[in-house]
Image: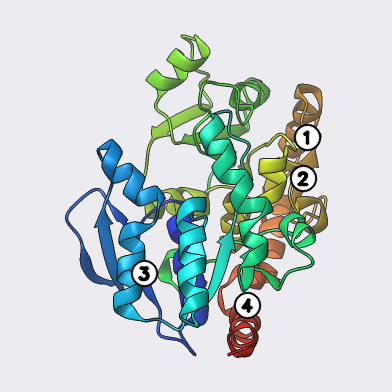
């Protein structure tokens, strides 16, 4: 906070959506010594990040968080993707003390580690169904928890912030594609395919945020870097958004697995908020909101389809690109936190009043 990862942006946006009716405070973890303070107008209390096995056990059991909840005596607790043992203990305490407990659910991973798998499955299949309500990020999760009290809120931003309003479009004739992320061991995001696809087109430029050229060479065992590919390394969130605003398209691909379908790509929400169309594939809720040739292009998640789609973009004029960007800008209100403030307030009010 405030310049954090997707999780930090999610929690901050939910808080902003609730700030008109509720007093919101944050409780989290820190690697530094910022244990108390104010961020974006919200008070926070941080706990030291666990280091030893004993500290990790206390963290997973939610012992420290529970102590602070007992001290604060809140009316409502929202647990963001919280460890299952800690969530179970929080559920027991909240029920006994007439505190409403909600979950903010933005993911459903399939860990290979047995302990993490048990933690995830207990939380997703059992505990979430036993707490008072759920804020979910996608229609996949909304459908799964359809028998529970649930509201769907996608990733959102503050469109009135200068970060999203100051446009810095380049004046050159190149069409700039932006990739933001980390390809891991190289088996994620199809970054190598994207690079190979862009390379033949002199009028395309690919900007890669998240890894350095040295990391690229190591991951993909490649020495040569195409002239129209630029690596800018890791950036802060604000710096990455500024790169996004200078681009013509945001490009990313995901396998249509349960983790990706259950989540919602923050990359898409931020691209639309910045007025930038996307090049992507079918997963999560994207098939419902990406209109071909209007706010982006959807390809199949194969090298051939990616090549065809990028080739289609390479044939566009800058005026055609500008028209798509204008369309995105005129339809970006659904990714502003204010768009969901009333529905989220009403949802929590309903949950709070029930059996109170």
The residue carrying mark 3 is: 26
Instruction: Using a 10 Å C-alpha cutoff, classify the residue at mark 3 as few (fewer than 14 neighbours), some (14 to 19) or many (20 or more).
Output: some
The residue carrying mark 4 is: 340
Seen in the picture, residue 203 relative to 335 is either above or below; the reply is: above
Q: CA distance from mark 3 to mark 2?
A: 38 Å
Q: Are marks 2 and 4 in contact (CB under 8 Å)?
A: no
Q: Farthest residue toward the front?
A: 96
- Point out the tag, 3 or 2, that comes first from the N-terminus: 3
- Provide the secondary structure element on which disc 1 rests: helix
Q: CA distance from mark 1 to mark 4?
A: 33 Å
Seen in the picture, residue 86 relative to 310 is either above or below; the reply is: below
Q: Say which of marks 3 and 2 sits in front.
A: 3
Q: CA distance from mark 1 to mark 2?
A: 7 Å
The residue carrying mark 1 is: 309
- Point out the tag, 1 or 4, that comes first from the N-terminus: 1
- Point out the tag, 3 or 1, that comes first from the N-terminus: 3
Q: Are marks 1 and 2 in contact (CB under 8 Å)?
A: yes
Residue 176 lies in what quarter of the image?
top right
Q: Say which of marks 2 and 4 sits in front.
A: 4
The residue carrying mark 2 is: 297
Q: CA distance from mark 3 to mark 1?
A: 43 Å
Residue 75 lies in what quarter of the image?
bottom left
**Residue 127 in the image, given as x and y percentages of width and height:** 61, 58
Rendered residue at 44%/53% (across/down): 242
- Point out the tag, 4 or 3, that comes first from the N-terminus: 3
Instruction: Using a 10 Å C-alpha cutoff, classify the residue at mark 2 as few (fewer than 14 neighbours), some (14 to 19) or many (20 or more).
Output: many
Q: Nearer the viewer, residue 10 or 316?
A: 10
């Amino acid at each position: 906070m405030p310049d954090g990862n997707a999780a930090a942006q999610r929690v901050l946006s939910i808080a902003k959506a609730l700030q008109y009716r509720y007093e919101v405070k944050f409780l989290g973890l820190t690697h530094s010594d910022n244990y108390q303070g104010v961020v974006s107008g919200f008070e926070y209390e941080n706990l030291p990040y666990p280091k030893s096995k004993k500290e990790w056990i206390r963290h997973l059991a939610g012992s420290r968080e529970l102590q602070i909840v007992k001290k604060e005596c809140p009316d409502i607790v929202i647990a963001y993707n919280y460890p299952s043992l800690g969530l179970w203990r929080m559920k027991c305490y909240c029920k006994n003390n007439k505190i409403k407990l909600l979950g903010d659910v933005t993911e459903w991973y399939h860990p290979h580690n047995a302990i993490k798998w048990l933690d995830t499955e207990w939380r997703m299949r059992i505990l979430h169904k036993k707490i008072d309500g759920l804020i979910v990020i996608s229609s996949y999760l909304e459908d799964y928890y359809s028998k529970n009290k649930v509201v769907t809120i996608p990733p959102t931003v503050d469109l009135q912030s200068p970060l999203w309003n100051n446009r810095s479009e380049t004046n050159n004739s190149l069409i700039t594609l932006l990739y933001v992320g980390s390809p891991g061991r190289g088996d994620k995001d199809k970054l190598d395919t994207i690079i190979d696809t862009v390379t033949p087109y002199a009028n395309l430029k690919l900007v890669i945020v998240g890894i350095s050229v040295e990391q690229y060479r190591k991951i993909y065992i490649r020495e040569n870097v195409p002239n129209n590919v630029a690596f800018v390394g890791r950036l802060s969130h604000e710096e990455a958004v500024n790169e996004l605003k200078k681009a013509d398209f945001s490009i990313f691909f995901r396998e249509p697995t349960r983790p990706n379908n259950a989540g919602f790509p923050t990359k898409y929400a931020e691209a639309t908020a910045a007025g930038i169309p996307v090049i992507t594939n079918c997963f999560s809720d994207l098939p419902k909101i990406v209109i071909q040739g209007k706010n982006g292009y959807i390809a199949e998640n194969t090298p051939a389809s990616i090549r065809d789609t990028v080739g289609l973009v390479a044939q566009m004029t800058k005026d055609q690109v500008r028209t798509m960007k204008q369309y995105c800008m005129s339809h970006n209100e659904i990714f502003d936190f204010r768009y969901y403030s009333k529905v989220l307030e009403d949802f929590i009010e309903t949950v709070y009043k029930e059996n109170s």
